[in-house]
Amino acid sequence: MFLVHCREALMHRQHAQTAPAKWPFPPIPGGGKKTPKLTRGAMLADICLVLVWGAMIPGMMWLGVAVGF
């Protein structure tokens, strides 16, 4: 039992040294240093989507009760 744990620990340590930082995903071309800017319109769209989604849950529950589920 102890030997199995030691072997697994050794395998994990060797894999961590040879694997890339974000394994199994390929590296981003250009180094990935540039972060995209989030525009005001994108933020507003995100907020609207969250509000609609948040209102949809109680609305669907209300409709379900009204129909008889």
Image: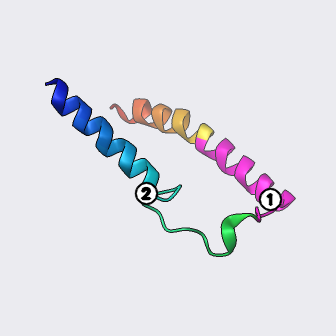
Q: Nearer the viewer, residue 24 or 48?
A: 24
**Label for residue 38?**
1
Of the residues shown, which amino acid type is indicated by label 2?
Thr
Left or right: residue 3 versus residue 44 is: left
The type of colouring in the image is: rainbow
Q: Position of residue 39 (x, y in %)?
A: 84, 61
Q: Main secondary structure of the magenta part?
A: helix
Task: Based on the picture, tell me whether residue 14 belongs to the magenta stretch.
Answer: no
Which residue is the extreme one toward the right?
A: 40
The residue at 80%/59% (across/down) is 38
Residue in the foreground of this view, choosing between 3 and 23: 3
Horizontal side, residue 41 vs residue 48: left or right = right
Residue topped by disc 2: 18
Taking 16 as reference, is 58 above or below it? above
**Which span is picked out in magenta?**
34-53
Identity of the amino acid at label 1? Leu
Task: Kindly report which numbered mark, 1 or 2, lies closer to the viewer in this rendering.
Answer: 2
Q: Position of residue 6 (x, y in %)?
A: 25, 32
User: Looking at the picture, does residue 15 appear above or below residue 31?
Assistant: above
Quarter occupied by residue 53: top right
Q: Residue at x 23, y 38 (%)?
A: 7
Neighbourhood count class around disc 2 (C-alpha, 10 Å): few under 14, some 14–19, many 20 upward: few
Whether residues under marks 1 and 2 lie with C-beta atoms below 8 angstroms apart, the answer is no
Q: Relative to 63, does residue 34 appear above or below in the rendering?
A: below
Q: Quadrant of the N terminus?
A: top left
Quarter of the picture containing the C terminus is top left
Label 1 and label 2: CA atoms lie apart by 35 Å
Disc 1 crowd rating (10 Å Cα; few below 14, some 14-19, many 20+) is few
SS under mark 1 = loop
Determine the secondary structure under disc 2.
helix
Return the residue found at the far top: 2
